[in-house]
Amino acid sequence: PVAVGGQTLLTLVGNGHSILADIRILSERVPSAFLAAASLARGGNNDAPEGGSDTDTDKGLFLNIFQSSNNATVESKSKDIMDSLSSSADRGSSSSKNDMEEAKKYAPFLFDFSYLHNPEEWEASLALPTPKVESNTGNVAPTKESENLLELEREFAVNHRQSIEEFYELFFSIYNYQQELNRFVEDLTKGFYIQYTVESVLLDLDGRALLCEAVWLYGVMLILMERHLPGPIRERLIIAYFRLFGRDGDISRIDVICKLCKSTGITPPASASSASFASHRSHKYPMDEEKMFTRYPLPVDLIRNVVGCLISDDIYQQSSAFPNIDHRSTRLSRQASMLYVILFFDPIVLREESAKLREIVDKYFHDNWVIHLYAGMTADLSLEWNRFPAAKSALDNVLTVNNVKRMHITNAKLIGQCMAELRAYLTMGILTNAFVLDNRHDLLNCLRRCNIAVRWRVLHRRTANAKYHPIVCAATEKVTTDPKLEGDFAVNDTHVVSLILLTSQLELQLKDIFRELLEKKESIWISCRTQACGIMNDLANYFKGDQTLARVSRHDGLILWFSSMAGEIRDLAYESGDHFTVTGRKIQLCVQALEEVEQYDLVDRDVQVKAFLQEARGMLLQMARAVGINEDICEDIRWISDMSYGVESMKAYVQIIHSRISKDPSNVSLLQGFFLKLSSSLDGPVERLKQLNSPEAARITGYYSLQLVAFVRNVLEIVPVSVFAIMVQMADIIERRLQRLPPKVQGDKLIAYAQLGERYKLAMMAHEISIFADGILDMENTVLGGKEVNPRKLLDEGLRKEFVSHASELLNNLLQFDFSAESETIVSMTKHHAAAMRSLTSLSGRLGGFQSALECVEDYVCMHGLKMWHEELSRVMKYNVEQEVNKYLLKKVLDADSKFQSDVVPIPRFPRTVNEPSCINFLGRVVSMLIKTTDAQYTTYSLERSGWFMSDGSEVCGLKTVSLLRRSIGVYGLTGVDRLLCYRILHELHRFVKFFRTNVSKQGVLLEQLRDELFPEWKTPKNAVAIYASGSKKTEMLMLPMLTCFRRVGQAQLLRRMIRFELQRCARVDAKILQHAVTTYNAASLSANQPPEGEPDDVKKMCDMTVAVGNGDPMSTIFMKTDPLEGLPVLMLFFVITYIPKGSYNTTLASLSKVKEGYPFDGWPIIAGISTLLKQFHPSYAKSFMAYVGQFIRVSVQMYAARRQGKYEDATRLAADLKNSLVLLEQFCDISGLPRSTLFEHVPQYVIEMCSNLP
């Protein structure tokens, strides 16, 4: 059809392909929470709906299978880890399990359709306490028992709103597609499209293909939705949208979507075969299609007409590609898959109409029973049609064990024949232009046989039928080059891979030759015609008999004949308007005339003339064959070499390809044709979109191209894996065996330092790496779909992936510490601290070995080793910082949103450790280690000595520790630790503000009264002792939370000071110019009266650079913006009064240290915490705090003077408290960067000097 009707139908088909792509895309993005909630569906009221599903079938098995097959897509999309890379698979599986365990805390409020029967009861259940969720390991998941479900629900809604809305729109788009298709058919029936009806559309060549595809695509949508988005997950997605976003979203379509997406309750059967449904999500299991397809059906008359058209006609006209009657099932395979799907719309045919089913089976399924549905998904008819009597009876007539054996043996023999022919054709020098022209039909027939053999074997090795699987997948114990053509006729995966690679290589070469022949067809014609004319003229001159060496008498007849033949050949014009058939007939007559002229005795007796005539006939035949080359041949080859059926099946053969490349890296050169063959899978989903000139074509092509490139990357991954495995061995030699060469070496010791044996091993390893790299570097750039595949880039990405994987695993394994906050002692702290230092030292050496190995081999693999090292290690650190920070954020950064995570070079995630369940990754454990090592219960901080010390004077954390940490995790890791400490401080400050507004504000009257009594601060109040005593007693319950906050904030700030000093020291040595440049830029920016120029991202990069070179004072950081807290300075005064007696001044460390061992008091962290808190408010807060403390000191001096003559113990205690107060105030000014004159404003200098001499 043309005009409006045809455009409408084409648009409908294009939309169908877009929806199918969206189903696949979104199925890879299902939030882990929905998988976890559905996996718990075996028990509990929430997961046993009364009427939400069509049946009460247990969904547990189904969801466990779905979860196991979706493990790789939870962490990252487009990532298929093969068995050959078992370590990578284990890492992906463990990270997915970790995600699932963490996601289980969201399960209580992710309801299925049972929620709709009694919403009030389900909502009321959310008010109950959160139950503990047991993990698979038997440990309690790291969710607090008192965690508020409403807060969890709010967090979930914030983080997953966009994803849930996308699924909701997807489900509605499927319903909308059905409505548009029904509307189009109704319009055809009513005559809105003049002169067209459903029947006339089916008579049109293009119209019947489009209409059949439109119906077929709707069925495929329902099947893919059920396979990739199971019912329990669909129900929870819809209810989540209804509950969380129903108030501000569009819920007018909720009824139709609920009807469409209702769970059928069918679970996939477990299979012990290699084509099990759990391991192959691309293999369809028997569903309740009848129930799905009747929810929103299509008109029965339409279905009957379409089925009749598919049974009787070849709607795609592929007879030129597969002309042989034996190849009919392959030619009609696309129609067969359409029939299989469309028949579900009319199940009566499948149940009762045996005659029609026998006709269908005899035409389409007499020699195959595993069919390709769409984009690599397959279905096994021997299982799918078991539920339908007529279909099962018709299939049983041809599908018997003996027939299956016969098909298997026939295919095995065909594979053996094809491999022999392929080896003959692919011998170097055979496939020339002339050979291809002469043997075009034989070559095309060989291609047909090869592709038919591959298709049957690849599809039927996926059969899930227990009777037929052992026959088709029979394997020999010993792997041979060719299939076993006797006995059980075993065909191994190796044989299939060999056949595919050789076939794709022949296809690649033939395509190139035919393309070249098409381009040079006219020049070949002219060249052959010129040579043939020249031969005729030479023969005419020869028979004149006047040539010097010619021993033949003159023959005027032959002279005239050859001259006229030369004219005939010259008149064969390529540009003539004659049809090529007429031209071919003329050439045939010329060849026949040349054969007849040989019968003359004079010609027959002359061997030289006969050779000339044979050469001339060859030239004429070349002209005839060249003129017969057209675009139709390339189109036939495209149809013949189509492998869209195997785009998913090929993932099962990756291990075989890896083993071939490992044995002989030169096999990589065979893969280019294989990848181009697989690119044919892109034609089906986007062909109609391109005809429509739809903007969606680029998006859909991009998705499928990325999927194919991901497969290519997975196949070639064996090269970087092998290269990096050798590099690991090199790193071990460099780190542990090679001696470091000192600046000066004595001559007699040079041999010892040479270590020729170790260096020879390194050289051999480098050579082995170069062999692996050469195979992939010799490949040419290839365009797959819309993406260009650069082999060098793939090698670089593969090496990056392996480096990221090994470095992440190393960081995760070595940065695990044994600290236990609840049961630590000084002895155990010392022991664990020593173990932590050993881990850091080991990590530093191992990573240093990796770096040296990368630098050694960078020239052999054409990459920049040091650049890769810094870029990837920086990305690993930043990603782990981002994920660790998530525990402090409501709007979390998921992997899909992270700018540091990548599908190509993914950063693995690891489960939390038992000792540190609150830490998400190794950087969190590093921060936790630093916090526990510097715990105030066991250590005291000294600002002068820049470190924390035990009571015996031993240092547990100082500049050496931070320097070792920098050597272990690098500058990027150290800046990451600094950022985590910032978030920890921010979290504590927010908690303090919340605590103040919740608890302290209730005593606002008391604080105001105390403030009035102490006013003015410069004056000594009356009854000061009573005021202080009364205030301390009334605020006693508020002091411990304040102590905890100040200690934690100050501890983190002091750690940041040490980190900043180490970064500054390192920058002065390694990046002096950069440090000066950043310092100058900062000074210029601060001196200007306007914000820095440039994009926000550029300014942020400059800020990060400032931190990296160690500039800036951490104590000056503003962490938050908050409203004033009335009474805060007064409350902090009583905090000082409460805790001053708990400490004593340590002259060795110049710090206030705890009086009682084990008490969590440390002077410098508390003072730093107070300074940081006051920095978040107006400077008047700090001024008021100092005024109140100065007032308290002056009162204490008066009390000491009054009681000095009294009891000695009282005077001594007062003197100690007075000195502690002065030390606190002096150290507060020091760490806050306040001038000493500020202190003298509140405490006279003579008082300070007098108090310094107190006993």
Image (tube, rainbow, N blue to C red):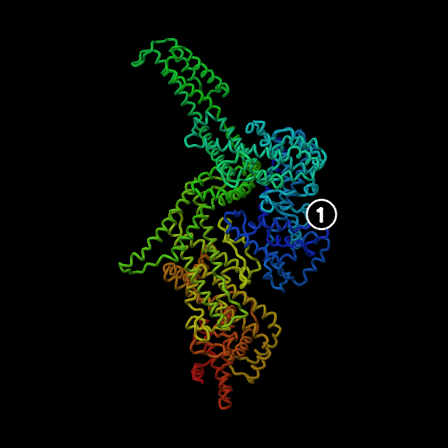
**Residue type marked 1:** Asp
Residue at image mark 1? 54
- Relative to 531, 43 lies left or right: right
Image quarter in which the N terminus is found? top right
Q: Is residue 525 left or right of residue 486?
A: left
Visible residue check, residue 838: yes
| Count of numbered tags | 1
Label 1: few (<14), some (14–19) or many (≥20) C-alpha neighbours in 10 Å: few
Tell which residue pokes out farthest to the left in this image: 747
Residue 223 at x, y percent in the picture: 64, 42
Q: How far from the left and from the top, in percent, is residue 494?
A: 50, 40
Viewer-side residue, 1091 vs 890: 890
| Residue positioned most to the bottom | 1205
Most distant residue in the front direction: 487
Q: Quadrant of residue 1130?
A: bottom right
Q: Is residue 201 visible?
A: no
| Closest to the observer, 601 or 112 | 601
- The quadrant the C terminus occupies is bottom left
- Residue 191 at x, y percent in the picture: 69, 32
- Could you tell me which secondary element the residue under label 1 belongs to? loop
Residue 612: where, in percent of width, then height? 38, 18
Taking 1032 as reference, is 197 above or below it?
above
Considering depth in this image, is 1084 or 1134 the residue closer to the camera?
A: 1134
